[in-house]
Image (spheres, rainbow, N blue to C red):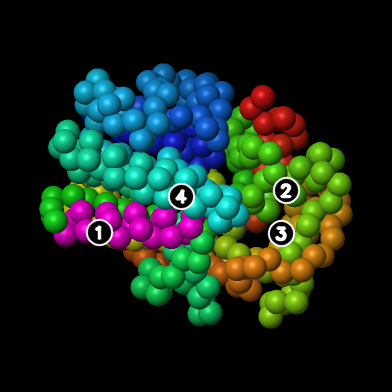
């Protein structure tokens, strides 16, 4: 019996592979490496001193995916594979819906064919849209405002419908907040292609002098320092959340959503300050106007995950900064 990881070479996927292997699970990984590197998986093997099967497969290729299920005795699936850049999703929405929604439909069809009905889905806090009331709970109204967020929302609804149609399914919908940091070894981390979409790799690239300065979008929000407040979570804490969710779905049925966040909001400038204090590296920045669609404050209530999964984040902002900088400074060109 093994666990299939789709998109296992990605930032969160690779860290989750490490945690699963450390917990004694056997894994099989598929990835099409469109936005990730096979080197990440070689380093997972190195960190855990364990081997596993890797398949170069696009989820839209039903025949190849079916072959993976035929070759392996798969017990459950953790589904990371998907495109994830909000700005890009606005520019090429059809590509996002095709990849994220249709890819999941193909995966579920193949799972059903092989009698595999246990799934952990990589969702996102973007499904909540522009909520005014924080902290966000799993019962907060949903209202994604971009194609990326809507693709995650659509998949959540599809998976709920799947469970309603067949109550033997067990599905965990994990809504991530803002994953940052890296493995403490510095061997695996976030390796964005081209311009980073997330704040931390931007900060670390400025620290590494690969970029001149950080761009901060808006300093006139109703927050303590005027910059946007977000719930930053260490990627290793997030990976451990997947292990806990897997334990839950292996022993129950249902379709439940869980927030994976710290429950603490930090502003952009607070993160910059924490990075400077932790690393001793100064981060020059410039203030620009607000970006369309950005909101002032967004952070989670992780109470349900603690109650139902026995999970909570343990690492703080300085851990996140220290580990992100170790990854960037020891891998200046990422996995290249």
Q: Is residue 29 left or right of residue 70?
A: right
Mark 1 or mark 3, earlier in chain: 1
Quadrant where the C terminus is found in the figure:
top right
Name the residue: 16% across, 36% down: 113
Q: CA distance from mark 1 to mark 3?
A: 36 Å
Name which of mark 1 and mark 2 comes first in the sequence.
1
Residue visible at 69% across and 80% down in the picture:
222
Mark 3 and mark 2 lie on one chain; the one further toward the N terminus is 2
The x, y position of residue 26, in whole percent, is 33, 28
Q: Is residue 294 magenta?
A: no
Residues under numbered marks 4 and 2 in contact, where contact means CB atoms less than 8 Å apart? no
Mark sitting on residue 94:
4
Q: Nearer the viewer, residue 48 or 107?
A: 107
The quarter of the image holding the N terminus is top left
Of the numbered discs 4 and 3, the one sitting upstream in the chain is 4
Asked which secondary structure carries label 1, the reply is: helix
| Residue occupied by mark 2 | 202
Give the CA separation, mark 1 to mark 2: 36 Å
Categorize mark 4 by other alpha carbons within 10 Å: few (<14), some (14-19), many (20+).
Answer: few
Are dots 4 and 3 in contact, CB under 8 Å?
A: no
On the question of residue 130 being in view, the answer is: yes
Q: Earlier in the sequence, mark 1 or mark 4?
A: 4
């Amino acid at each position: 019996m093994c666990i299939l990881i789709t998109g296992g070479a990605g930032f969160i996927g690779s860290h989750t592979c490490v945690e699963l292997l450390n917990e004694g699970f056997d894994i099989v990984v598929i990835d099409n490496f469109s936005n990730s590197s096979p080197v990440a998986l070689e380093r997972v093997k190195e960190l855990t001193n364990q081997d596993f099967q890797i398949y170069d497969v696009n989820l839209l290729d039903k025949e190849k995916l079916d072959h993976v299920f035929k070759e392996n005795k798969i017990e459950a699936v953790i589904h990371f594979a998907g495109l994830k850049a909000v700005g890009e999703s606005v520019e090429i929405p059809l590509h996002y819906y095709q990849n994220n929604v249709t890819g999941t439909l193909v995966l579920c069809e193949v799972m059903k064919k092989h009698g595999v009905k246990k799934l952990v889905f990589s969702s996102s806090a973007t499904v909540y849209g522009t909520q005014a009331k924080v902290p966000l709970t799993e019962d907060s109204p949903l209202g994604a405002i971009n194609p990326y967020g809507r693709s995650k929302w659509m998949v959540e609804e599809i998976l709920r419908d799947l469970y309603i149609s067949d109550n033997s399914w067990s599905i965990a919908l994990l809504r991530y907040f803002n994953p940052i940091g890296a493995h403490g070894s510095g061997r695996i981390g976030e390796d964005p292609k081209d311009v980073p979409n997330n704040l931390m790799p931007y900060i670390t690239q400025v620290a590494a002098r690969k970029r001149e300065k950080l761009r901060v979008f808006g300093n006139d929000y109703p927050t303590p320092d005027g910059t946007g407040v977000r719930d930053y979570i260490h990627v290793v804490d997030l990976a451990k959340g997947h292990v806990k969710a897997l334990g839950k779905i292996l022993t129950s049925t249902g379709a439940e959503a869980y927030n994976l966040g710290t429950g603490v909001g930090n502003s952009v400038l607070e993160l910059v300050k924490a990075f400077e204090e932790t690393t001793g590296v100064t981060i020059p920045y410039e203030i620009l106007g607000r970006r369309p669609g950005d909101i002032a404050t967004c952070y989670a209530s992780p109470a349900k995950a603690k109650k139902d999964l026995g999970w909570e984040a343990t690492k703080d902002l300085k851990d996140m900064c220290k580990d992100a900088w170790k990854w960037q400074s020891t891998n200046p060109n990422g996995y290249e």
